[in-house]
Amino acid sequence: MAVESRPAREAGHSKLQDLLIVDADVHVHESPGALAPYCDGPWDVALKNVADVPERYLDIPGFSPGGDGTLTARFPTSHEATRMVHTPEQMVAELNAIHVDLAVLFPDHLLKLPVLPQRDYAAALARAYNAWLVDQWTSRHDALLGAIVACPQDPEDAAREIAKYADEPSIVAVYLPCAGLDPLWGDRRYDPIFDAAQNARLPVLLHAVTVTSPVFPFNNHGFDTEFARHSTSHTFSIIANLISMVSTGVVVRFPELRIGVTEAGISWMPFVCNRLDKEYLERRREVPFLTERPSHYLKRVYVATQPIEEPEKLRDIVTLMELYDGEDTTVFASDWPHHDFDHPMKLNQVPFTPEQKRKVFGENALTLFGIDATGRRL
Amino acid sequence: MTDVVVGRLADFPPGTHKVVEANGRRIGVFNIKGDLYGLPNVCPHQTGPLCEGRIATGTLQADAESGWRPSWVMEDEVIACPWHGLEYHVPTGRCLAYPEITLRRYPVRVRDGEVVVTVGGRRA
């Protein structure tokens, strides 16, 4: 289900094919049956047991419980929102069609890894996914780079996984799942993960997804619609986790750690910078390890563009980015193949300077992931 | 520069401070462990009455050496603006949250048992 590539028509737009485009957030489809051969016992038995369960979007019992959008009335539609990518060949062809040169792969179902209550099962799933990702995807094509998942239920095991893949040429990031996460990523129990990532020179990338859960900030049962839940789940989660990581000092305790956030757009970032700076002047004592105002640390966080806001005046995107000094920290992401993916043509319409455009589409991501323009780790 | 007598030393026992007027300026005079300091009674943040906070206290600090755990430091040396809580280290005038802000410090000394603050010209 590829999309057609379209030439940039309007004067002043760079041709997408002339730009280096690094995509910070693309999703592979990992089915329970695919992961089973990579999974330790006895959990492989459970995976095989659900291998043939008819699956809905991000919704398999005992694997990714609680589907995205399953709470609201289901009317017929041609926007089925079930696009998936099953093979590296399919992925490369579809990314070529949208002019993406290099892509960092995230999972589908394991977006909801934190909601699984069984620690050993969650850790086994994470190990299986990481092994499968390298074996079946990132080792198969130079354009496909990987983010291994860190299992929040078992931080020590996650740290071992990060060390294991520290020198894997095709792994360029550690994915920190956020949906239903408790406690938030600033909790000290996760320090081994940050320590391992810093030592491995791998950035951590936060990624949420819509779930309804008692866990803050996913306690979104007050909303009637997926319109409301989906508007807030990703963004609130990213805001909550970044505030958590600033307020517990992750950002100062791991000074070499590169942090990125995905699938929250960009317009919340100036708010968080300004809000925390305002709070800091009154409550510095509670964060006495900060030596700079909170925005100093937030402005070092890399922000992936998708789902890029589409204001009437696209110049507002430039203004928003400038409000968090984001010229060197904003990175393109498509979220292909998900229902709300961004074709790079939209960001290409934003009146960036040529330099800003080169940075946002590719150069900033090279710095974030520590790679050259061919995807080779530096 | 003008020397202004603002009271007797006995009016400023150690561990206390009070706001005095000198040449049209309102100045907080602090006695911290026997040393006298003078700061403007105006917080640069939103012009709050900085030195009218009840007591100077210590504050919390954390760094790599403390294992990132907070410790109580600068005992008796920190004044927080009663309006919004922005903290200042009295002996240096340094704002703890925003290092680029340092308050003006008025020289204070004792002459014949009297406390003398040195200020600039008269302010209307």
Image (spheres, coloured by chain):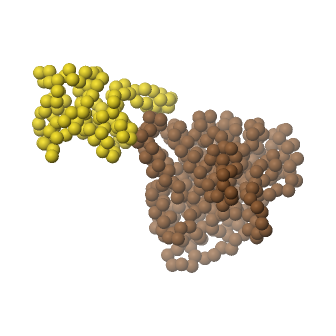
Chain colours: A brown, B yellow
Q: Nearer the viewer, residue A371 or B107?
A: B107
Report the label total: 0
Q: Is residue B109 visible?
A: yes
Q: Considering depth in this image, is A92 or A290 the residue closer to the camera?
A: A290
Residue in view at x 54 percent, y 78 percent: A10
Instruction: From this view, report whether residue A233 is shown above or below residue B10.
Output: below
Left or right of A183 in this view: A314: left
In the drawing, does residue A252 fall left or right of residue A61? left
Q: Residue placed at 82% from the left, 56% from the top?
A: A55
Please name whichever residue, A24 or A238, is drawn nearer the observer in this view of the structure. Answer: A238
Residue lying at 34% horizontally and 45% vertically, measured from the top left: B45
User: Split into 4 quadrants, where in the image is the N terminus of chain A?
Assistant: bottom right
Task: Give the answer, above or below, for where A1 lies relative to A194.
Answer: below
- At x 51%, y 69%, the residue is A314
Horizontal side of A223 relative to A252 (left or right) equals right
Q: From what the image shows, is residue A276 above or below residue A68?
A: above
Image quadrant in which you'd find residue B118: top left
At which x and y percent is residue A340? 66, 63
Q: Quadrant of residue A331?
A: bottom right
| Residue A146 seen anywhere in this rendered image of the structure | no
Question: What is the x, y in percent for residue A256?
Answer: 52, 42
> What percent of the width, then of the height, locates residue A233?
64, 53
**x%, y% of residue A113?**
72, 46
